[in-house]
Amino acid sequence: MMFAVANQKGGVGKTTTSVNLAASLAATKRRVLLVDLDPQGNATTGSGINKNDLEHSVLDVLLADIPAIDAILTGSGGYDVLPANGDLTAAEIELVDMPNKEQRLRQALQTLRSRYDAVVIDCAPSLSMLTLNALVAAEAVIIPMQCEYYALEGLAALTQTIDRVRETANPTLHIAGILRTMYDPRNTLATDVSAELFSHFGDVVLNTVIPRNVRLAEAPAHGVPALQYDKNSRGAMAYLALATELLRREKLSKKKED
Ligand code: ADP
Ligand code: MG
């Protein structure tokens, strides 16, 4: 199972989702790898790894053919991390002239397939070459979104990109689900946008909702997922529920394929 967590909008909860989903999957005794594909390196830091003290990062794996296993570190949340930092901004430019430039991550992760039960890829807020690498490598895309006024606007560009990747490099790529994040059911705008989401996307919208929860915002400063920071928090619980829902859905969609 390999998920890309993508939305070209910043601040919608991609990294929070990546880190806490990885921790939740690890809590179900699965062997999990979190791939940080954002030069901001927030998933790396949020997993308790110092991004300024990396011997190798995902950049070396993408550009220099360093085996992924040599760059992987153990995070604080019971899962492994292929870390990133600001050096990754160079990847955009460097990748352009490389052969199989959209396939680099897929190829790098191929050798790791038997080591992990689940891989979660945290994407940067853009539809860049790095995000394309994530979409080519992944089996399914999780799209976190905040139910705000302009939230639906960017979704078309993202779903078109997913369609294009499906038609070319990755025919079985699908949307694992649209995830409503920082959700406040008392906010009528949020409930309106939520209703609109369901009418556009139907059951592609996940039933699990991530509430706005201060523990989710605090945990990264402590270098741990919410499950380690405050396991009874609403945020930690919501991400456990997300893991359960995703596992159930992916099992169903596999059954349909067979
Ligand atoms: P992205 O990776 O899409 O840019 P982040 O996951 O970094 O988004 O989230 C943006 C900000 O919102 C961060 O400061 C994060 O701590 C906070 N945040 C994300 N999800 C929640 C939530 N459910 N409740 C409260 N704060 C959240
Ligand atoms: Mg992020």
Image (tube, rainbow, N blue to C red):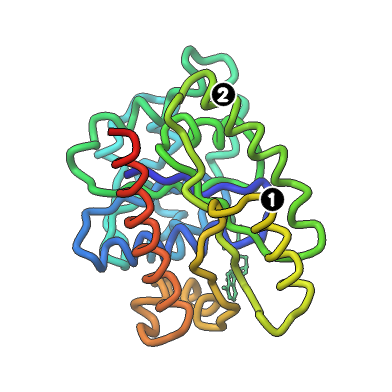
- Is residue 112 shown left or right of residue 89? left
Which x, y percent locates residue 5? 51, 49
Q: Which mark is residue 94?
A: 2
Indicate the amino acid at tag 2.
Answer: Glu
The answer to whether residue 85 shows anywhere in this view is no
Front-most of residues 12 and 95: 12
**Secondary structure found at label 2:** helix
Above or below, 240 against 171 in this view is below
Residue at screen point 42% across, 37% down: 138
**Dividing the picture into quarters, in which one does residue 150 lie?**
bottom right
Residue corresponding to mark 1:
200
- Is residue 196 shown left or right of residue 178? right
Front-most of residues 127 and 182: 182
Front-most of residues 191 and 100: 191
Count residues near mark 2 (Cα–Cα under 10 Å), then give few for <14, some for 14-19, many for 20+.
few
Which x, y percent locates residue 256? 34, 39
Above or below, 169 against 3 in this view is above
